[in-house]
Image (tube, coloured by chain):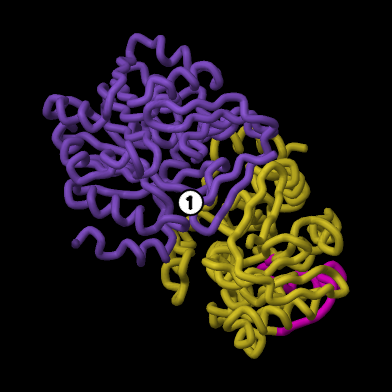
Chain colours: A yellow, B purple
Amino acid sequence: MYFEEEQGFIKQSLKVEEKIFETKSKYQKIEVYKSTDLGNILVLDGNAMMSQKDEFIYHEMLAHVPICTHREPSKVLIIGGGDGGTAREVLRHSDISVDLVEIDQEVIDVSKKYFLGIDEVYKNPRLNLTIGDGVDFIANAEDKSYDIILVDSTDAKDYAQGLFSPAFYAQANRVLKDDGLIAVQGSSWFVEMDEHKEILKKMGSLFGIVMPYRYEMISYPGVNWNFILASKKYHPTADIILQRADLIEGLKYYNSDIQRASFAVPTYVKKELLGIAKN
Amino acid sequence: MYFEEEQGFIKQSLKVEEKIFETKSKYQKIEVYKSTDLGNILVLDGNAMMSQKDEFIYHEMLAHVPICTHREPSKVLIIGGGDGGTAREVLRHSDISVDLVEIDQEVIDVSKKYFLGIDEVYKNPRLNLTIGDGVDFIANAEDKSYDIILVDSTDAKDYAQGLFSPAFYAQANRVLKDDGLIAVQGSSWFVEMDEHKEILKKMGSLFGIVMPYRYEMISYPGVNWNFILASKKYHPTADIILQRADLIEGLKYYNSDIQRASFAVPTYVKKELLGIAKN
């Protein structure tokens, strides 16, 4: 038995033993599969979000790359990320407090039940949880109130579409401090280059430094996907990152070599992205 | 209709229009599929070897990483690689001549017919083709006669098994000059860690510098796979590579950032590989 997911011309099938949970929340279909080699797999509207075996890659890369790019972050806003993985990683940094805004309470409940350790994350006093729409939350947030925003969302469809709009990026720009930065889900070079370019273009009109970086999730079709980092001041491969990147305890993927490597751009991608900043 | 390939717990299916060629050679089953998005796909014994759309990644990474690590290579031995892609990349360097040893003439014939541009490679006067077994060829080659050896093979099974034996690596060590280096197909961290460690261990007992580096092939299950570079003298992320890496004309993937990035090792892999060199 397989969990199957199709993305363009690729269909990836992961061996599973059974579907152990399924519900239809107000926002999406939520499923959990027990797989043969990847532990439990969380699936939202048919798309694998994480498996227990590879979720550390996604969450470490979304959290620590922006955090180690910033000189001294203390206030982080996570939009989405109800599974708690990104918050877990951010909270490893003891001087950071987190506001987490998840639209779907059921994602949190399912994650607590089927993915180990998430319960602890939600008990951390440095985490403030809001159940609500990230677009509304950010529209009502104060000017220059965050160091870092992490958008831990599904693809740009249905209820998540607002998180990929120019209006949302403008609000993010407004609520970030003068040296703030934001990282968002940025699609994929090989499988979804058009979507990737679209996001880069929108963010490029607002932020001085806009750079894609790569992560890998064996449970995603195509495996290599991108986050996009947009920064008002700090550059992610400048040496400041070396100060802290290799000192974070308990990590399984991220280190300073990986930070630098994740920003390397193949030549065909450089050609594709040429001129985007100008438009 | 799909071309399907299973590797451990992952099955990847690529959309294809039809199978346009099939034969059973003396060594293997050879198939060519016409895909919807990746051009023609070459399949040996059920494993995708390349597609027209992503073959540049594999071939550029196998050829240019070792070449740009070496100070002044002039003689390169390619074992396998009958599809001509690796030779095409090596021959971009006008001061290099190539000996290519392919066991299966039919792979060459099929590649010439279904993969554009390969015919030109075989007409290049700097290429010497031998149809034969790479293991025999290297056993009969002179001491210290090559700067670089590239093993462009299938996985370690059936007729290719000899290319992964300690005896083969010892011969490679013998026929390489004192500053020579070799790159081989090195399996995959996430899908085949045991095989990867096995190859590292064998090469680690012979060469001072042994380092895995990563490449991506969208047409392979798991996408991220590894080559392993073993070197007698030169280090692949030392600055010498900057002299030439960004000056090679006509490339689509490789550049100096990619060379450095490809050697970055995630923390969980560092832990897995710890102590291998000692055994």
Does dot 1 land on a helix, a strand or a loop? Answer: helix
Rendered-image quadrant of the C terminus of chain A: top right
Q: Along the line of sight, which residue is nearer the eye, B51 or A91?
A: B51
Q: Where is residue A27 in the image (x, y as percent from the top left)?
A: 85, 70
Give the residue at the far left of this rendering: B143
| Above/below status of A203 relative to A94 | above
Q: In this view, does A96 lie to the left or right of B102?
A: right
Whether residue A64 is visible to the viewer of this picture, yes or no, is no
Q: Residues within 10 Å of mark 1 (few under 14, many from 20)?
A: many
Mark 1 — on which chain does it sit?
A
Residue pointed to by mark 1: A261
Residue B94, located in which quarter of the rendered image? top left
Q: In this view, does B256 lie to the left or right of B12?
A: left
Residue B83, located in which quarter of the rendered image? top left
| Above/below status of B92 relative to B186 | above
**Residue at (52%, 38%) from the top-left corner?**
B48
Answer whether residue A141 is magenta in the image: yes
Q: Is residue B129 left or right of residue A59?
A: left
Q: Along the line of sight, which residue is nearer the eye, A9 or A71?
A: A9
Q: Position of residue B76 (x, y in %)?
A: 28, 25
**Residue at (32%, 28%) from the top-left corner?**
B78
**Residue at (27%, 37%) from the top-left corner?**
B182
Q: Position of residue B59 (x, y in %)?
A: 45, 32
Magenta segment: A128-150
